[in-house]
Amino acid sequence: MEGIIIKNISNDYTVQVDNEIYVCKPRGKFRNLNLIPLVGDKVVFDERNNYLLEIKERKNELIRPPVANIDQAVIVMSISKPDFSDNLLDKLLCVIEFNNIKPIICFTKIDLLKDDEVKEAYKFMNYYKKIGYEVYENTELAKIKDIFKNKVTVFTGQSGAGKSTLLNRLNPDLNIKTDEISKALGRGKHTTRHVELIHLFDGLVADTPGFSSLSFIGMTNDDIKNNFIEFNKYRDKCAYKDCKHHLEEDCEIKRQLQNYNILKSRYDNYLKFIDRRWIMKIAASFLSIKNGIKKNVERLDKTTIDYLHVDIMDGKFVPNKTWSFRQVKHILKKTTTPKDIHLMVKDVKKYINKYKKIRPEIITFHYEATDEWFEMIRILKHEDIKAGMSIKPNTDISKIMPYLEYLDVVLVMSVEPGKGGQSFIPSSIKKIQELDKIRKEKNYQFAIEVDGGVNDSNFKLLEENNVDTVVVGSYLAKRRTFQKNIDSLRETKKQN
């Protein structure tokens, strides 16, 4: 029998056939073939024994949120609380266009603006309409109801922008849980804990967990350029067919920018997206901070780092042992920077179930610590936490090949795990190059993170090899002027 997966909770997949519902589990061959069913998948299943047998070919899929066979994506963006991010909107539009999904923009919380701010907001919204996007306000419920018929629609966008609230207003019977915005974070609490297709206005709608970061991994700079749709109107008038619309002198896109026909924020975001040097992020580890740890972590939190990298050791997988869960919660209590949890532990599942409670952006576990790799990835994705896998210096890339398609992060240990202050192992570069080659050839979406011995002498080298995030610990802790140390690393990129 054939049907469509409309819900996934844990290892249970709800399959719908007409008006009948079946709760199925995947057969063991799915794990052997490295297949993970997604909501939206069209599947063949055994209706007697409730087993999934086959996943039909997908027309598209998103990794985050994990949904397949999508027709359109409603991008819900808040104008205020959380503050509007044109950078996030343009990222979402670009990546969604790249995946052959129709984007639809819905702006929320316009009523929170002052009169002069409303006028500026409408100028901005009208630009997106002019270049060809469907744009709605969340108060235009009658118009929004008309977009769903015979479509599979995903709701996505800013965390806390009001996706669940909007769906509840469209159909009060849905009763999707909502929370107030966390004032301390200025971002939404993740109120949706699973992905589910809901019947709405003769279509299917996925309400998915919010997220506030997105990667262009798997996309070339030409892909990014080609999915800024207003550029396509003018690019044939550029002097060069392969014009990047950046450093070239005779560029029609830059002329249209000067004539105010292209929105400056759109062009600025395009330049940021194609600048690989800008993309590399810094995750600050506080493992090497020995005194006044809570106070110094709060100081780190006020710097321009991208993540707080939390090293968790159990004294079993590695000789050293770090803080208890209660201590970590206390240390991080007043911080707002996204958390990147690195588990150097034997009982991976136990620690994931603990640390998921602090809602980190990433949890990374070691390949060498478990033999339930797919199960750990599934648990993390179910919790809308990015799934990371780390490998020790002596572990070959071939060992993790079956999992790369499903990972959000691969953490390359460039020192032996478990102790700060070690020197960078030069052979790590070969691993990084191999991973980068694999993800480009296979269009995988994982980010490459490097941990161990990172400083101003190798920062540029890591950047040149397309590393996405570097973990920096001892280099930051050697002096207590954290921001100066961070600035010196970023300046290393500019000088080179």
Image: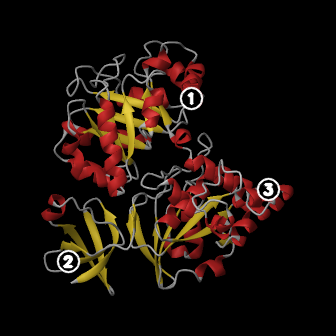
**x 33%, y 87%: residue:** 18
Which badge, 2 or 3, is on the more N-terminal residue? 2
Q: Which residue is mark 1?
A: 490
Assign a secondary structure to mark 1.
helix
Number of residues whose C-alpha sits closer than 10 Å to that of mark 1, classed few (under 14), some (14–19) or many (20 or more) = some
Q: Is residue 282 above or below residue 200?
A: above
Q: Relative to residue 424, is residue 407 depicted above or below?
A: below
Q: Amino acid at mark 3?
A: Gln
Instruction: Give the label, 2 or 1, closer to the camera.
Output: 1
Q: Which residue is mark 3?
A: 258
Number of other residues with Cα within 10 Å of mark 2, as a class: few under 14, some 14 to 19, many 20 or more: many
Point out residue 228 in the picture as x, y percentages from the top left corner. 60, 62
Q: Quadrant of the N terminus?
A: bottom left
Residue at the right extreme of this rendering? 116
Q: Are marks 2 and 1 in contact (CB under 8 Å)?
A: no
The quadrant in which residue 465 appears is top left
Q: Given the image, on which type of amino acid does mark 1 rest?
A: Arg
Which of these two is toward me, 346 or 217?
217
Question: Given the image, on which type of amino acid does mark 2 rest?
Answer: Phe
> If you read the primary sequence from the N terminus, does the residue marked by circle 2 or circle 1 appear first?
2
Q: CA distance from mark 2 to mark 3?
A: 57 Å
Residue topped by disc 2: 45
**Quadrant position of the C terminus in the picture:** top right
Q: Check the image and report above or below for 415 versus 53.
A: above
Q: For this view, does 483 lie left or right of residue 191?
A: right
Q: Secondary structure at mark 2?
A: strand
CA distance for labels 3 and 1: 30 Å
135 left or right of 255 in image: left
Q: In percent of the image, x 14 and y 59: which residue is there?
A: 32
Res. 388 in view: no
> Residue furthest toward the front?
239
